[in-house]
Image (cartoon, helix red, strand yellow):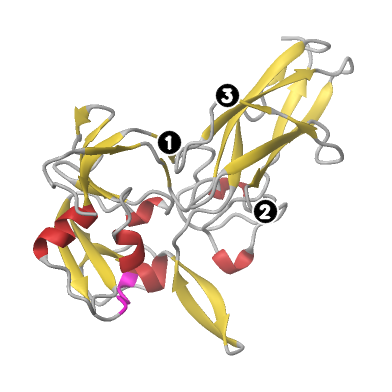
Amino acid sequence: MSCDPCDPKRASPPSKCAGNSRVFLVPQVQGAQWELGAAGNAEWTGVPLRALLERAGLAADACEILLEGADRGMPKEEPLPPGPISYAWSVSRSKAIQPEVLIAYQMNGRDLSRDHGFPVRAIVPGHYGMASVKWLTRIQAIREPFHGYWQTSDYAYWDSMDERPVRRALGEMQLKSEIARPRVYETVPPNRIYTVTGAAWAGENDVTEISVSTDGGRSWAKAEFLDPVRRHAWRRWTFAWLTPKRPGRYTLLARAKDARGVLQPGKHDRSYGVYVINHTLPIEIFVGDL
């Protein structure tokens, strides 16, 4: 079905850096030491990318859509390219023509700020943030898979093909949950009902269950969602915890399950290197007098 490019569409996907929670990796790794930030949920207004491609006459043999931003420079980490490069990322044709993929010009009802990609940016729901190219300057349909720097040397992971290691670009966000309250090393009162809160999300799937452990993963109890299932949006959740009478240090964990029955992993998959930190994260807190 064709869309009128003048008809704005809205989407409310979570946006998350692929390096979110990197500070939790042991031993410490290179890169920005993101804690529980670098993630958010916003309402975006824009034109479906599919409508622009239809208007331009997308060639039948185009396999990817290349998005290029205005930012240009030299990466800071090895391996380094021979000279300055622009930020560019490709999206598969099948994903690019989905109605939720937007060329956005507003965030939460306001024109994009400079930091958020003014004047227009891509929004690719369900994929890590590197696919949602900011300060968009060029959209190009290409006939061969794109092997640019960012998709091979940086935002990539190790896979195998015919028992040989290959590099593949990051893509769909993996199932994850986070605890927002209490904060790491926060002190909470003993023998009180304390409300633990957080959010959970998945890439191209729906989060259907959330559980919380207050004893470092030895036992789990179901938490309650505050939000209904909404495709490509996170679900906030809450858990009423009767804090222990005994003061001390405790470890809280949150664990999500999706509609396919996939459970959030307990350990980081090292094939992803410094990215895709979606395992259950230990939130150390203290119970004692405030």
Identify which residue is drawn at 38% across, 50% down. Answer: 129
SS for dot 2? loop
Identify which residue is drawn at 76% across, 20% down. Answer: 241
| Residue 167 image offset from top left, x and y in percent | 47, 77
Up the image or down, 189 lies above or below 271; here it is above
Which mark is drawn over residue 262? 2
Give the side of residue 264 with respect to residue 118, left or right.
right
Circle 1 crowding by C-alpha within 10 Å: few under 14, some 14–19, many from 20: few
Up the image or down, 290 lies above or below 35; here it is above
Name the residue nearer the viewer: 107 or 192. 107
Identify which residue is drawn at 49% across, 44% down. Answer: 34
| Residue 99 image offset from top left, x and y in percent | 30, 50
Magenta stretch secondary structure, dominant: loop
Task: Give yes or no for contact between labels 2 and 3 (Cβ–Cβ under 8 Å).
Answer: no
Identify which residue is drawn at 62% across, 65% down. Answer: 270
Q: Which residue is mark 3?
A: 226
From which residue to which does the magenta span run? 145-149
Circle 2 crowding by C-alpha within 10 Å: few under 14, some 14–19, many from 20: few
Q: Which residue is mark 1?
A: 40
Residue that sits furthest to the front in the current view = 1
Name the residue nearer the viewer: 88 or 225. 225
Up the image or down, 231 lies above or below 161; here it is above
